[in-house]
Amino acid sequence: MDGIVVWATLRNIRVSPQKLNLVAATIRQLPAVSALDRLVFSQKRVARDVTKALRSAVANASERYEVSADELFVREAFVNQGFALGRVSARAKGRAGRIKKRFSHLKVCLSAEGK
């Protein structure tokens, strides 16, 4: 089981990359089971999306390589910037201010523990 690496990607998450990276940093280098526990009890809204990606990666590993979740750990969790919607906010004296509604991409890498 050495060398098993499984990826799961979740694209176009409606949150800024900075906020998503705060949650992704809490699960890096953890066993998959304890990472799921940590995400379930997280107070952040984006933790639900990260949980979805992590569960997808665990399911990919169990389907393709018949590896249980107890043998997996989170090797990497990448956060990339997606597109940004441009919005307009009204300002004083008839002016307008730009608001960027940012989107993010998340890529979770699981690996089997090689002993």
Image: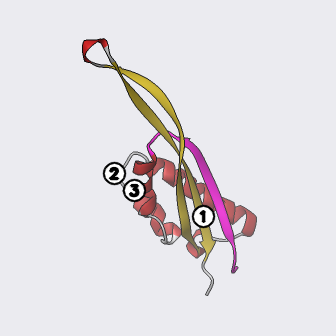
User: Would residue 62 be seen by someone viewing this image from the given angle?
Assistant: yes
Type of residue at label 1? Cys
The residue that mark 1 highlights is 109
The mark nearer the N terminus, 2 or 3, is 3
Q: Which residue is at a point 50% across and 48% down the rendered structure image?
A: 49
Q: Mark 1 and mark 2: span between their CA atoms?
A: 23 Å
The quadrant the C terminus occupies is bottom right
**Quadrant in the rendering for residue 92:** top left
The answer to whether residue 60 is left or right of residue 107 is: right
Frontmost of labels 1 and 2 is: 1
Q: Mark 2 and mark 3: span between their CA atoms?
A: 12 Å
In the rendering, at what x and y percent does residue 39 appear?
Answer: 43, 57
Type of residue at label 3? Leu
The residue that mark 3 highlights is 22
The residue that mark 2 highlights is 43
Q: Mark 1 and mark 3: span between their CA atoms?
A: 17 Å
How many other residues sit within 10 Å of disc 2, few (<14), some (14-19) or many (≥20)?
few
The quadrant the N terminus occupies is bottom right
In the rendering, at what x and y percent does residue 3 appear?
Answer: 69, 77
Type of residue at label 2? Gln
The mark nearer the N terminus, 1 or 3, is 3
Query: 64 or 79: nearer the eye?
Result: 79
Which span is picked out in magenta?
1-16
